[in-house]
Image (tube, helix red, strand yellow):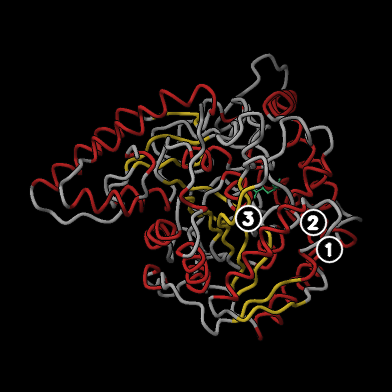
Amino acid sequence: MDLCHLTAHELHDLLIKREVSSVEITKSVFQQIEKAENIIHSYITITKDSAFATAEKVDKKITSGERISPLAGIPMAIKDVMNTKGILTSCGSKILSNYIATYDATAVKKLKDVDMVMVGKSNMDEFAMGSSTETSYFGITRNPWDPNTVPGGSSGGSATSVIAGEAICSLGSDTGGSIRQPASLCGVVGLKPTYGRVSRYGLVAFASSLDQIGPFAKDVTDCALILNVISGRDEMDSTSVDLPVPDYTKSLINDVKGLKIGIPVEYFIEDGMDPEVIASVRSAIKLLESLGAICEEVSLPHTNYGIADYQIISRAEASANLARFDGTRYGYRADDADSLMDMYKKTRSEGFGAEVKLRIMLGTYALSSGYYDAYYLKSQKVRTLIKQDFDKAFEKFDVLLTPTSPTTAFKFGEKMDDPLAMYLADIFTVNCNLAGIPGISIPCGFSSSELPIGLQLLGKPFDEESLFRVAYTFEQNTDYHKKRPRMD
Ligand code: GLN
């Protein structure tokens, strides 16, 4: 197999045995980019020169006998919603299409500090609003398993770069499913950490109480390695939590005997769900049972309010966060305005795409006086009920297991004219963000048309370790994560 299709931990072993160099790995990734990028379009910006400079630096360290970290010399993609010093950080939007970041997001800085090789900035739905990567100002991203289908979103480019071999692993952000859903549709592993586990400093805010940065990788081990690096308290983000960061590789244990796994009944609905998804997830449950896990049904009675609740909270927060983009301080500015107010209006009207404007309008409405109590306050109360459902379930269960997405990858255009259908793509992922708990999506099968299917594991706050343990056990006993798209 080409180097670009290996995992970070496999490549690290080859690096320290001096069987390959980081420059060779980086070359393999860039050759794959040459081959695949004009169809897949994983990237908005590619940073080839600095990638090779970092790779050379790592190779020198290895030659001089220096110890290197597990991610040193490993090519990674960074979602274009994270600030990267000196490099375009566009959020997939026209309004930031000329914005060069002046600093690194903390998660990016931590990876740079361990000599990760940044390949480029990956494509995404505009301001992370979407489930298909169809709303980027820079064009769509295609799913490597079938280029007529979407990769999921909003972190579409971060998912496709990994499965297509255009990066070894990547970072994405997840506000309502934007890591887990594209991971599921592209057949890779994607983790949304507990809210507060990873600093959001330098992550351009969509909905601040829901956003979290997390890894995409070809297997669970690589996800654990990345989480080890990016986690922890950061004084630049007051919502990052001051708890010790465990070594997550210690949770990579191939054993689920006696672990209690809850199966929420509300996540297995016949209506609107692809029967092949249900069948795959059910057989995954059987496999875990055969390995000694105790799987039992549980009810999370407020599940169905999640999508509506998420719509209000995420849009309200977005309308406040996106107020800063007005042409004054950075980004695109309309140049033919005759007054300051006209400049604001024209800049925002020309700079934002339709989905972003729709959300800003709904959010502003929900926060306006007279409606605040009816919508925003009410939605915060519902959020508490959703959180309490999980608290109760976790009194009995170690983790919960659900499908990640109701369907496999859908065709381009299929949901673009029907926002509600698009929003329902997140039906199984948003409640995790509302409750602030961690969630991981791992490959668990393929449909008859050879599209990947993912399952989701949800855990107690700051118990990513149990997710890794169950995910790792499943992975060790299956081969789904080893399949690669043909891309011919
Ligand atoms: N697809 C969801 C939305 O459109 C989630 C986005 C996200 O997690 N950033 O809002």
Q: Which mark is residue 208?
A: 3
Up the image or down, 486 lies above or below 313; here it is above
Query: Which amino acid does the dot numbered 3 rest on?
Result: Ser
* Residue drawn at point x = 80 percent, y = 54 percent: 312
Q: Residues within 10 Å of mark 3 (few under 14, many from 20)?
A: some
Up the image or down, 259 lies above or below 42; here it is below
Q: Position of residue 212 (x, y in %)?
A: 56, 56
Tell me the mark number nearer the camera, choosing from 1 and 3: 1
> Residue under circle 2?
307
Q: Which mark is residue 304?
A: 1
Tell me the mark number nearer the camera, choosing from 2 and 3: 2
Query: Which amino acid does the dot numbered 1 rest on?
Result: Asn
Q: Under 8 Å from ligand 1: the CB of mark 2?
A: no
Q: Position of residue 12 (x, y in %)?
A: 26, 52
Up the image or down, 431 lies above or below 317; here it is below
- In depth, the one of 93 and 426 nearer the eye is 426
Query: Which residue in the rendered view is the most extreme toward the left?
Result: 64
* Residue drawn at point x = 84 percent, y = 37 percent: 418
Q: Quadrant of residue 400?
A: bottom right
Q: Residues within 10 Å of mark 2 (few under 14, many from 20)?
A: many
Query: Which amino acid does the dot numbered 2 rest on?
Result: Ile
Q: Is residue 267 left or right of residue 47?
A: right
